[in-house]
Amino acid sequence: MIHIVSGPTCAGKSTCIQSSRTRSIANLPASSPVVFPSAIRDNAGVLQGSCVLHYNILRTADHLCEMSDRTSQAMYDFSSDPAWREVRRRAQPRSAIVLLASRSVLEKRMSARQHIEPEWLAHPPAEYPVEHWMMILKKVDLRALYMAWCAELEDASIPYTLLGSENMDYEIIESERFRKLDLN
């Protein structure tokens, strides 16, 4: 089983993965290795067996931020991410958690963040690249990003649970309430 824990940078994916509450909500086995998309690029075999995929849904926007010919729609096209294509092509069971956080919460966390994810350890920045992620977040319609990600999961037949991550209580958010949330 591939357990996908997803959300934008600073939504609380690492904290969620370590939380006993979310482990029980999503049936995340405590012994499953955490896999980052860069590891999939280097070795698709890391998806064998049970694992937890730590997936930043701003990855596509990040890859496009330097391109002058990008379209806003392309920022929400997850099929352009080779690591995500590998996850989609897998026949093994998959499930997902989508962590919901508003723009103001994400910006606040970005400004205070110091921890650098293992994904960046091959070429680690001196510190968390706050300005870089703030720039990307400013270019993204957060509601459209979340809607596109949920549509992507549905298209891939991956069941998902929406969790509020603003105060780390990981409240389950029903679809009806999600549509009414002010995320921008």
Image (cartoon, helix red, strand yellow):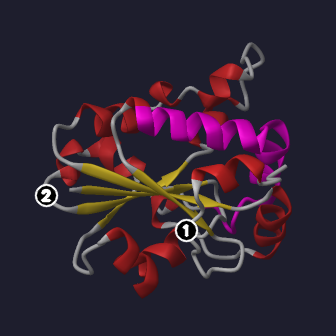
Q: Earlier in the sequence, mark 2 or mark 1?
A: 2
Location of residue 111 with respect to 138 vertically, above or below: below
Question: On the rendered image, what quadrant is the N terminus found in?
Answer: bottom left
Residue 49's disc is: 2
Which residue is painted at 69% across and 69% down in the image? Answer: 127
* 71 or 170: nearer the viewer: 170
Q: Nearer the viewer, mark 2 or mark 1?
A: 1
What residue sits 21% from the left and 37% below the top? 90
Helix, strand, or loop for circle 1?
loop
How many labels, in total?
2
Span highlighted in magenta in the image: 125-154
Cα–Cα span, label 2 and label 1: 27 Å
Question: For residue 29, which quarter of the picture?
Answer: bottom left
Asked whether residue 73 is drawn in magenta, I would say no
Q: Is residue 58 above or below residue 173?
A: above
Residue 152 among those drawn in magenta: yes
Residue 62 seen in the current view? no
Residue at (44%, 39%) from the top-left corner?
153
Task: Judge left or right: residue 159 versus residue 140.
Answer: left
Name the kind of residue labelled 2 in the image.
Gly
Q: Amino acid at mark 1?
A: Ile
Which residue is tagged 1? Answer: 172
Q: Nearer the viewer, residue 116 or 152?
A: 152
* Disc 2 and disc 1 in contact, CB within 8 angstroms: no
Main secondary structure type of the part rendered in magenta: helix
Which residue is at the front of the view, 33 or 24? 24
The residue at 78%/18% (across/down) is: 68
